[in-house]
Image: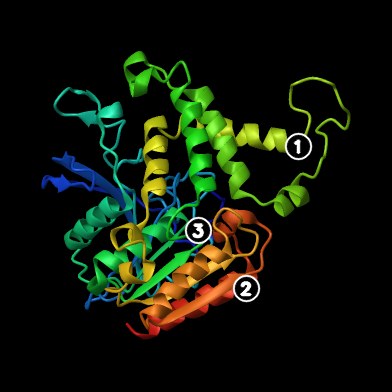
Amino acid sequence: MPDKIPSDSVGLVSPQTHHFDQPLDLVSGAVIQEYDLAYETYGKLNQAKSNAILICHALSSNHHVAGYNTPDDKKPGWWENFIGPGKPIDTNKFYVVGSNNLGGCFGSTGPSSINPDSDKPFGPDFPIVTVKDWVQSQARLSDVLGIEQWAAVIGGSLGGMQVLQWSIDYPDRLRHAITIAAAAKLTAQNIGFNEVARQAIVTDSDFHKGRFYDHNTEPSRGLRIARMLGHITYLSDDSMREKFGRQLRDERIDFGYEVEFEIESYLRYQADSFVGKFDANTYLLMTKALDYFDPASDYDNDLAKAISHAKANFLVVSFTGDWRFAPSRAREIVKALHDNNLNVSYAEIKATHGHDAFLMKIPHYMEIFGAYMERVASEL
């Protein structure tokens, strides 16, 4: 943590956990008999309980969205740029909730949790959960917190998919839906990237068919490769060229297979820092949830029909340098919303940061996001 906490930070925050003993019926047909959801909150819920904001996280993120969990934290929550006093999601005005998705590995019940039937980690026995299942579990958390209607549900990437599902499944429980750098379904290319990442994990000799916990190990080699592949897709060619170019680490070619280019060093660092922090079975589960997301599939592949029950006002944001979730995919969502005569604002932000742009303090992005949140606040 910095020597002095910035005045626009939520400061030190503590994660909370709620245990649900009511069974959760999943889309797959499986049933989770009981489970925990980890979450954090920032700001204060007003008397009318009308100022609550739900933040839905992306694939490898979690409920720690802003602030610091301990005085020794070197970095704040993953969306610190956007949440805090005076920031676009202003905690002087809003009560903000970040929830760790079911199946995660940061406090919510997932593959690394103990299965009460065996007293061992669930491992591969943990059922695959979908975006629809996550939204159902988040609705139950809303009930626990006494929130009948969210002022807004907000998310980027996989989080944006959850926002879209919220608007479909619980149209009366959110007034605004903000989906950022997302799509209504993955392209075949994106599914292909996810499959390569999964294959890297499951073919690792330390994977043990998902029961690596029993062997006191983890498929670190496969997880490293999966993370490296992921980072390549999160960046754009422009951002990689600007950040690394073809720069040699030691300013010479060694004619070998060790780290020579700066981009190699960066990818290896990201991979090494990921291993030991993220569960391999959770990575498999999260990428499958991404692959399966396609709300239009239940409506004759007509996205407009899928969204026909939605009532929320929408802000849809895309980034020009995001080739994994390109602006054209965001415009598909916008068209479906317009087809239902819904109130939608769309912003296509010029940015070279790739898919990770939704995490960045890009001035135009911050300006648009902030202005929309002021509108949300004005209706409290």
Which residue: 64% across, 71% down? 363
Residue at which label 2 appears: 364
Residue at which label 1 appears: 262
Q: Position of residue 308 (x, y in %)?
A: 30, 74
Label 1 or label 3, whichever lies nearer to me, is: 1
Sequence-first disc among 3 and 2? 3
User: Residue 47, located in which quarter of the rendered image?
Assistant: bottom left
Sequence-first disc among 1 and 3? 3
Amino acid type of the residue that numbered disc 1 sits on in the rendered structure: Glu
Q: Position of residue 106 (x, y in %)?
A: 36, 40
Q: Is residue 320 left or right of residue 30?
A: right
Q: Is residue 123 left or right of residue 326?
A: left
Which residue: 23% across, 29% down? 114
- Mark 2 near mark 1, Cβ–Cβ under 8 Å? no
Amino acid type of the residue that numbered disc 2 sits on in the rendered structure: His
Residue 128 visible? The answer is: yes
